[in-house]
Image: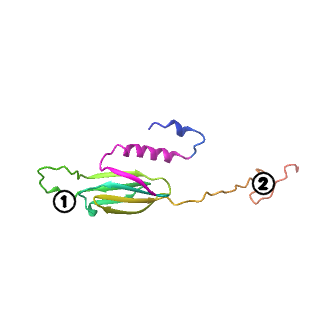
Amino acid sequence: MSRNIAFNSPFLLGFDHLEQMLERAAKASHEGYPPYNIEQIGENKLRISLAVAGFAMEDLSVTVEDNQLVVRGRPSEEDRERVYLHRGIGKRQFQRAFVLAEGIEIVGASMDNGLLHVDLERPIQEPEVRTIKIRNPHSKPGGKTIDMDAD
């Protein structure tokens, strides 16, 4: 794996997971089926809509795996046994993955007119400010200082 030069900066400590997520996202972007839309439906709400014409709800699964939203579709056995004279509606097995940012929650999923909608929400988090106490390196763990001039 070649490292991205941006992640070699000494100011980006602990961002290795971000680099891995970017690699996963780049890999997933090469998938073309099924087509999808991502729309903002509120200030902190998103909706991913996948075109899954011909799939029944039982043929689809939506899971979250290691900060990835994974949508899978598998045609039923009944579909595989049909004999088509012309097949213009694509209905093949698929897996579509979306990398999720930290804190994104899946609110729910629904089917409507051949579209699978997955609703996501980013809860508003108040910025956390913590004060770190600076201690004297010559003090004991109990907080008492050591007299360095005593002989």
CA distance separating discs 2 and 1 = 73 Å
- Give the residue displayed 77% in from the left and 56% down from the top: 140
User: Which residues, given as a range, are shown in magenta?
Assistant: 14-41
Q: Which residue is mark 2?
A: 139
- Give the residue displayed 27% in from the left and 63% down from the top: 58
Residue 51 image offset from top left, x and y in percent: 30, 54
- Can you tell which of label 2 and label 1 is closer to the viewer? 1
30 vs 12, left or right, is left
Q: Which residue is mark 1?
A: 77
Q: Amino acid at mark 2?
A: Ser
- Give the residue displayed 31% in from the left and 45% down from the top: 32
Tell me, yes or no, whether the highlighted magenta stretch contains residue 142: no
Mark 2 closeness class: few <14, some 14–19, many ≥20 residues within 10 Å: few
- Give the residue displayed 74% in from the left and 58% down from the top: 141
Q: Amino acid at mark 1?
A: Glu
Q: Give SS at disc 2.
A: loop
Residue 23 image offset from top left, x and y in percent: 43, 43
Q: Give SS at disc 1.
A: helix
